[in-house]
């Protein structure tokens, strides 16, 4: 049971969440012509009248870019203004997740992006750990990640997530927690909604953008942290067998944060994860505004 925040932003105004409803004829519902963002926030541990948001500016930029792929001009500063007011109206008291969504809101039946009405809504819910912080088990999915030549992977296009949904259910129903998808070239791409990292001989390795991955904001943050912490980094293609012999594997994303992988298929991974733990500790300190070196990654909203 989800605990949704009481106020939503819908059709240009703030209204009660339960009143923010769309028609069954909505264009995006039928054709997947929407794009979403997702960002986490927490009450400031040192100031109960303030909320902390991680990399708000980057999230707004990415959603604006996703909207552009749908032929919709939605400036990042407009998104940021709405999200800030959304926080002030809801005044969340626990860790939460915000879902902004752009979509074709017309009631037409023709699959197109031109001459069709677009809109933008925001809702939120209380959210703790999306995946177990103790670690998860993963299987290699029988479903493959889409290619950018057939679907614009530089945006979080809602229609693309049918593949993620199929992969996640396949994994769970076969006894695993999460799925890892390969790309059409047979290389590791990403998990159902997270980027994948591998540690081998002290080097942090992750598939590059050319591997049909989402340009994850948490992924980018981890790479910056690793370089600043003098952890060797490589962005390159990753083979399936590398997952089986890795020293560490972890998943990253807004909801998942940094989640270690305990097992891939039948291959048990080491229980000691020094690189994963060092990065997770640092990222947690940053999101709680305890790291002076990265305070520009934390956006504060006064809710008193």
Image: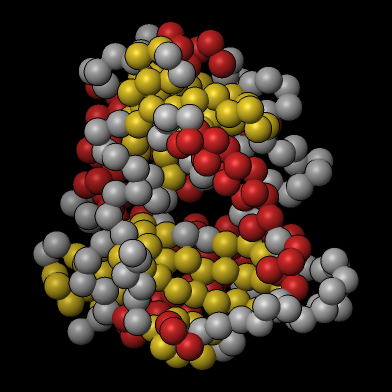
Residue 34 drawn at (x, y percent): 67, 65
At x 88% / y 71%, what residue is drawn?
110
Residue found at x 51% / y 84%: 20
The residue closer to the viewer here, 5 or 303, is 5
Task: Residue lying at the far front in this picture: please name it.
Answer: 173
Side (left or right) of 90 relative to 215 = left
| Residue 272: quarter of image | top left
Question: In the image, residue 175 lies at what x, y percent?
Answer: 42, 30
Q: Which residue is drawn at 49% across and 75% down?
A: 122
From where the camera sits, is residue 217 visible? yes
List x then y, in percent, for residue 72.
73, 71
Q: Quadrant of the N terminus?
A: bottom left
Does 118 sit left or right of 2 as displayed? right
Is residue 55 shown above or below 93? above
Does residue 136 sit above or below 40 in this rendering?
above
Taking the spot 54% from the left edge, 35% from the top edge, the residue there is 170
Q: In which quarter of the image is the C terminus?
A: bottom left
- Residue 210 in percent (x, y) is at 68, 31
């Amino acid at each position: 049971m989800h605990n949704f925040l009481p106020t939503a932003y819908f059709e240009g105004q703030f209204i009660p969440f339960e009143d923010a409803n769309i028609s069954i004829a909505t264009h995006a519902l039928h054709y997947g012509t929407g794009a979403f963002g997702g960002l986490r926030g927490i009450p400031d541990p040192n100031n109960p009248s303030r909320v902390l948001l991680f990399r708000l500016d980057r999230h707004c930029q990415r959603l604006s870019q996703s909207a552009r792929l749908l032929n919709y001009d939605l400036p990042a500063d407009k998104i940021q203004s709405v999200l800030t007011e959304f926080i002030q109206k809801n005044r969340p008291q626990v860790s939460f997740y915000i879902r902004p969504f752009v979509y074709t809101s017309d009631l037409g039946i023709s699959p197109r992006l031109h001459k069709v009405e677009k809109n933008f809504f925001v809702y939120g819910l209380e959210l703790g750990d999306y995946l177990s912080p103790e670690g998860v088990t993963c299987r290699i999915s029988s479903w493959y990640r889409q290619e950018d030549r057939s679907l614009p992977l530089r945006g979080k296009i809602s229609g693309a997530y049918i593949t993620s949904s199929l992969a996640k259910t396949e994994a769970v129903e076969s006894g695993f927690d999460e799925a890892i998808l390969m790309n059409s070239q047979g290389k590791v791409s990403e998990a159902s909604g997270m980027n994948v990292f591998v540690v081998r001989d002290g080097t942090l390795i992750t598939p590059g953008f050319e591997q049909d991955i989402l340009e994850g904001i948490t992924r980018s943050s981890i790479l910056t942290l690793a370089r600043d912490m003098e952890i060797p980094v490589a962005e390159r293609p990753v083979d399936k067998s590398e997952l089986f012999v890795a020293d560490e594997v972890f998943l990253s994303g807004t909801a998942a944060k940094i989640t270690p992988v305990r097992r891939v298929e039948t291959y048990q991974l080491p229980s000691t994860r020094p690189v994963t733990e060092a990065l997770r500790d640092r990222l947690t300190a940053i999101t709680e505004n305890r790291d002076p070196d990265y305070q520009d990654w934390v956006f504060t909203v006064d809710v008193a």
